[in-house]
Image: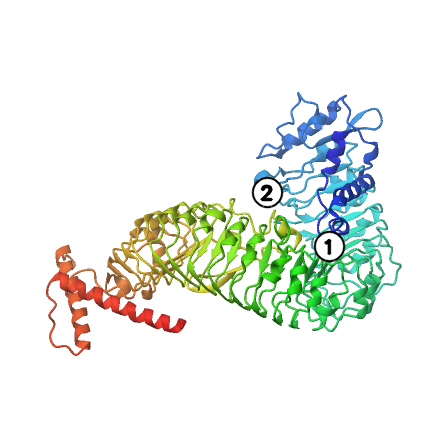
Amino acid sequence: MATAWRSRLSFRGRWPLHHPQYYSCYYQLPDLVMLCWLIILASFLVEVTGVEEARVSSEGCLQRERDALLLYKAAIKDPSDRLSSWHAQVDCCAWNGVVCHNRTGTVRVAELNLPNDHKTNWKEYSLRGELLHPSLLSLTHLQSLDLSYNDFEGTQIPPLVGSLHKLRYLDLTGSNFGGTIPPHLGNLTNLRYLDLNSYYNSARVVVHSLDWLSGLSSLIFLDMSRLNLSDASPNLLSAVNMLPSLQHLQLPRCYINNVPLSLNFHLNLTFLRTLDLGYNNFYSPFPNWLWNLTSLSSLQFENSKIQGRLPTEIGNLIGLTYLDLFLNFLSGPLPDTFWKLKNLKFLDLSFTLLGNSLLMGIMNLSSLSTLRLNNCSLIGPIPSELGNLTTLNTLSLESNLLSGLIPHEIGKLVDLESLDLSLNSFEGDITEIHLSNLTKLKEGSLLEYINLGNNMFFGEIPSSLGNLMKLEFLHLNNNNLKGHLPLSLQNCTRLLVVDLGDNKFSGNIPLWIGQSWQQLRILRLRSNMFNGSIDPQLGYLWDLQIIDFANNKLLGAIPHSFGNLNIMISTSVEQLPSFDFGMRILEETKIFSGSESITLVTKGEQSTFSSILYLVKSIDLSNNELTDEIPEELGYLVGLHTLNLSRNYFKGKIPYSIGRMSSLETLDLSFNNLSGAIPQGLSQLNALSHLNLSYNNLSGNIPFGNQLQTLDDASIYIGNSYLCGNLVNKSCFHGNDTNATSEEYGTAQREEDRQLCCSREEEKNLTGCWFNGEEEIADCVAYVREEGRRLWLERRRGRRR
């Protein structure tokens, strides 16, 4: 029986965020949380599957059911061998995913639980093909079927599914089915749980009619997310109204565009607790019938083009714990009745225009755990009373017009996990007082995400920030912060992203970064006043995918150890988990990859990366005072997309190994002292779309062929007097003699050098041209170039001052 119970629990792990159970349990006292989850799961599974009667028998499964399952295995593709335990010599009740029950004295297969738990690279682990094979019809006592995140390969759900009459639980989430939804699903009169969420589906799925829902009168849970319900929209509500037991209804991204604002029939959805209609196209006010759903604990209408004001009837939904109205066309102040929603745990009103007094009214919602008011045109200071919302674990007020000092009372939010105050006009110091309570816990704060970027903060980073030992994301960019990085930050060993760019930090880049921040993936120190050399230890941060040290005063050479940067060596994305997937902080606080963003310079332009940030691989060391030769080891970084070493003092040849950097899209080596020939291997960089080699001492023929044929802008090579080729209108041969020897060509080049220096002397009103020997000419050329660099540096430093 224990085996059966564990199998039952495998139906679902934790409830999704939009489920009211999540918020009715997660925020209770810690010692009650586990008990609460078990009670909810048990009660739900009993209701859905009748688990109280189930037990596992030692008698073994029926031969015909075993044969049916073996036929099923033979009919589908199993590239990762997930069904390796399925063979005739073993009782099928012991096979992976198979659960048997004995309720009538005979052992029967009652559950087939074959979800694909590999959500990244899911196709490699998917069962594929005819996943609803006719052999399943032999399992006449099958009550639960879970094929989620497998692959129908775009084929339609077959009508035979309607013949699995005893099914209570059917989960086809993200299983890449296509076509139309068969109305035969309406024959499953015992069904309690139906999940048709088409997440991951590559094929379009259309529902022409929902009349078949009338046969599912016992349904408790219905998820049709991402199905195209545009044709069924006019009768959607009347069809769903035939489900009197329904508690959870998920219809986001369903192209719903026509729902009646009022009803001429009685609303039967008296038990409905979760309603998700997000990302649809209503272009209308809230429907009036919505406020009669007084059992609701979760309501989601994010990005659904809802217009007008929030009506006073919102106060009827006093059981709400989760309310998401993000990105709608709402305006005007919130009604006074809104503050009756004292059970709210989650509130997102981002990208709405609901009045400047919003923050003061929020103080009435003392149970809030997540508060997101991004881009709401809020003005003025943060009221100190915000510190009274001591249950907050996520506070996001980014992209408003808030100003003034951050109140010290924010330090009272001791449960805070995510703080985003970026893109406002806050000023003043970030003081120890702000952080004192946040860091008072024995093992540091719960805070994992801090974004104070794009404000006007000044002063130094307080050393107590280093007590936030669970911190994973730190954004302090675009402020006026100064001083050295405090030693205490080495305690923040979980950091994944550090953006301190566009401030006035100074001193050496600390050596402890390469020793303590072993999980670091992004390090952006751009546009500060860091000096000294680059620590070779940084080359051993295996997960680093973005290094941006541009616009500082760094000296010395690029460490040869940079050739060890493991993520940049790989061209695979398997090693790069998204910044939202599988990470608790991002899942539970709705900080998804779209809001974790970094601004970089790529292809000569400034770009902000968010949704694909986890794929970006870049090194930018431009505009420093780095010297010596470019290390050959950089050529090992075949997964790197951007390499910018411009405006430094690099000398020697361009490493031939750069021709092996097959993923390189941007290569900028301009304004250096590089010499010699351009490696022909650059023509093999098929991804290269931005190249700048200007203002160096490069010589010889400009390579041609393959990718370089598309980069036909002469400015790429300007300022290299010794380059020749059609692109710079300069013959690589002496005069008109196409058979000129290399000695004759060298003589011609030396004469051009001499003329360059002579013209330089004539500009100074000196008479005659006294350059004769090769050494004198070479010294002159070097002098001319160095003087030009000095003037450029003076202009740059003048701008900084």
Image: 711 above or below 172: below
Q: Is residue 742 left or right of residue 487?
A: left
List x then y, in percent, for residue 463. 54, 57
Q: Quadrant of residue 377?
A: bottom right
Structural distance between the alpha carbons of marks 2 and 1: 24 Å
Residue type marked 1: Leu
Residue type marked 2: Trp
Q: Residue at 59% of width from left, 38% of height from top?
A: 125
Q: Is residue 58 left or right of residue 537?
A: right
Q: Which mark is residue 122?
A: 2
Q: Quadrant of the C terminus?
A: bottom left
Which residue does the numbered mark 1 point to in the structure image?
251
Q: Give the mark, 2 or 1, whose residue is nearer the N terminus.
A: 2
Badge 1 marks a residue whose secondary structure is: loop
Badge 2 marks a residue whose secondary structure is: helix
Q: Nearer the viewer, residue 518 or 414?
A: 414
List x then y, in percent, for residue 599. 50, 62
